[in-house]
Image: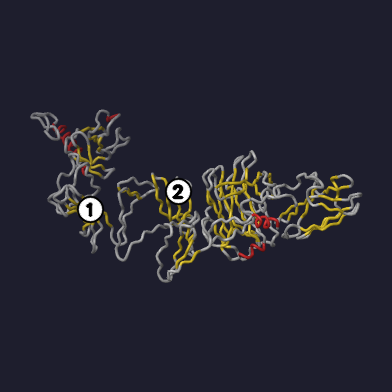
Amino acid sequence: MDGTPNLTLPYIIAAQAQKHVTHNEALRALDAIVQLMVMDKDLSAPPASPADGARYIVAAGATGAWSGHSGRVAAYQDGAWMFYVPREGWLAWAADEDELYAYTGSAWALFASGGGGGIGNVVEDATPQLGGDLDANGNSIGFDDATGITDDSGNEQLVFHKTASAANQIGVTNAAAGNSPQIGAEGDDADISLRLRGKGTGFVDADKLGINATADTTNRLAVRSAASLFDNTGNGHQQKINKAAAGDTASQLYQTGYSGRAEFGLIGDDDFHVKVSADGTTWNEALIVDKATGAARFPSTFYVDLPAGSAPATPASGKVRLYAKADKSFYQKDDAGAETALAGGGSGGGTANPNLLANPDGRIDQRHGGSAATTADDAYGGPDRWYSLTQTAAITVQRQTNGEDGMPFYQRLTQAQATAQRMGRATILESADSRQVRGAQLTLSGRIRCSSGQAIRYAILEWTGTADAVTSDVVANWASSTYTAGNFFLGSNLTVAAVGTITPAANTWTDLTALTGTCGSSANNLIVMIWTEGTAAQNVTLDFRLKLEQGASATAYQQRHLAVEAALCERFYQKSYDADTAPGTAFTAGGDGPEFQHASGTMGVTLMLAARMRAAPTVTVYDAAGNADKVSYYNGSWQNNGALSVLAARQTLVYYQHAISGALFTNFHYAADAEL
């Protein structure tokens, strides 16, 4: 044998010449591999200027002078590179990493990582310490029962427990007194309980939690089970749903097939709402409870069902019961058992408030007699007391009949332009009728239908400028979605009492969600407006019948007598034509309209108006041919285009005078306008 079996150091052979060479070669090898410290283990090419005696572990892919020596120890000795083949178990300290590596027989591995060169057992040292991270390298770390990891003061921080079953428990403890925080799995092979518990003010912080269900970023807590139990501790149990602002929603939603069917809570404001839906899209308000007063409103009608002839039991002391009988009349019973019939009956109950709007269903149409009327922006036309408001151009307005049972009349707006635009209708209440409700709550309700099923807005507005001198074009910016004064509405002399919105299903009569506001102390005139929130395409129609009343909730719509409605309208506009004949329609002279006999060539007559008007009207007269500001006269035959020389109007009368040569009779129709 020429060398040693482990380090392959050369022997000095008997009778060998130059024995010092062999001896020095062995010393050089010992100097290279004993107490092995390498400068680097990741180089695949020799450094440019190595120090004498510097050692390296040659990385894979060796090149240059190191070519073919990957994995070996390269030592720069006496100006040349010497290479040493490592054996399994060699240790080398990497100076650039401050790490200890062991040779596994095929590769160099971190001493702490196992891999054949790591620590197999730490037994003798009762308190072994690591100088770096501990990597189990895919192996298990075992603990005895009720042992685990402690801190540097000996306090248990992580304790492992075992049971006779397949389930183990991990308990997280600390040195403080009382119940410890814990992560646990306990039980037998069939039933295992999981425990996750904090301590003190500490809590479990989970981004999402699914209990037999999939949680997501919207439903961060998802539970799928037959029932859920929230039990109490102490004196009771509260479920709390918070919202950040009044305009947000805090509610409970009930669904069928993940489509909403019922919802209750604080929905869009701080009043309590209950609403229902048949399809998850169109919602009907069933109940609204005012946050300030506790007053309850039933926007979608309130029903009471009792068997024929029945009555409820006598209420407790200080209480009154309201109920209905088979005749659909309402009754009350006091705590003495006395029964009192209330007014009203089957059309909605006996306490309906009067409607403050004149011609709310559009049945009076003196200007066009029920025919379609083209109306420009801020212009009267179509049904009395209402004027049109448009974003860009004229629309068509017409009285309609028989909308549904109990609705013989209603108004219809038609968007007549090829270019889509927003459109609406408005009416102004006279100051005498507006100032009487200052400080009172007002409620706007009604029935609407839209052919396109788009969002509809409606509002109660207050004019605070000069009484009965209203700027009727109340829209400042049709494109604004901020429905306040100075944005969508005018910024001067106008207060927005309330604005509502609803999106009815297309071509479906729908109750407006009742809108309630308080009339301010500076209101001189009230204005009610209804309009399409977005632009309406050509031929889109909006049908409506409205009610404005004093009070915090909507009551049943009750139609006034035709004569009463006509008189309310004639205070603002009246004519001498028949009810459904439009002013300017031709007629037969001498057989229609006011006719006066007078001396030849001169006429002076005072004509009393049908009703006292709001103010002195603007009067237009028409001859038999329909010419405006002309009269027909008889001078042997009937002539048209006769000129009046004097026309003076007052609230109750109009004085006419002319001097038409040879005229013996004068005949004409008139229209008197005192609209706001």
In front of the other: label 2 or label 1?
2
- Disc 2 secondary structure class: strand
- Disc 1 secondary structure class: strand
Residue 402 left/right relative to 137: right
Q: Position of residue 71 (x, y in %)?
A: 23, 33
**In-front residue for pair 357/294:** 357
Q: Determine which quarter of the picture holds residue 104.
A: top left
* Residue 613 in sight: yes
**In-front residue for pair 220/478:** 478
Residue positioned most to the left: 14
What colour-coding does the image apply?
Answer: secondary structure
Residue 335 left/right relative to 359: left
Q: Position of residue 653 (x, y in %)?
A: 78, 59
**In-front residue for pair 146/330:** 330
Residue 212 left/right relative to 592: left
Q: Quadrant of the N terminus?
A: top left
**In-front residue for pair 87/617:** 617
User: Label 2 is placed on what type of residue?
Assistant: Ser
* Residue 77 in sight: no
Mark 2 crowdedness (10 Å alpha carbons): few <14, some 14-19, many ≥20: some
Q: Determine which quarter of the picture holds residue 569.
A: bottom right
Of the two numbered discs 2 and 1 on the same chain, state the one appearing first in sequence.
1
* Vertical comparison of 532 with 676: above or below: above
User: Label 1 is placed on what type of residue?
Assistant: Gly
Q: Can you identify the residue that label 1 sits on?
A: 184
Q: Position of residue 63 (x, y in %)?
A: 30, 29
Tell how many labels. 2
Residue positioned most to the front: 309
Q: Can you identify the residue that label 2 sits on?
A: 277
Q: Position of residue 483 (x, y in %)?
A: 58, 53
Q: Quadrant of the C terminus?
A: bottom right
* Vertical comparison of 113 with 559: above or below: above
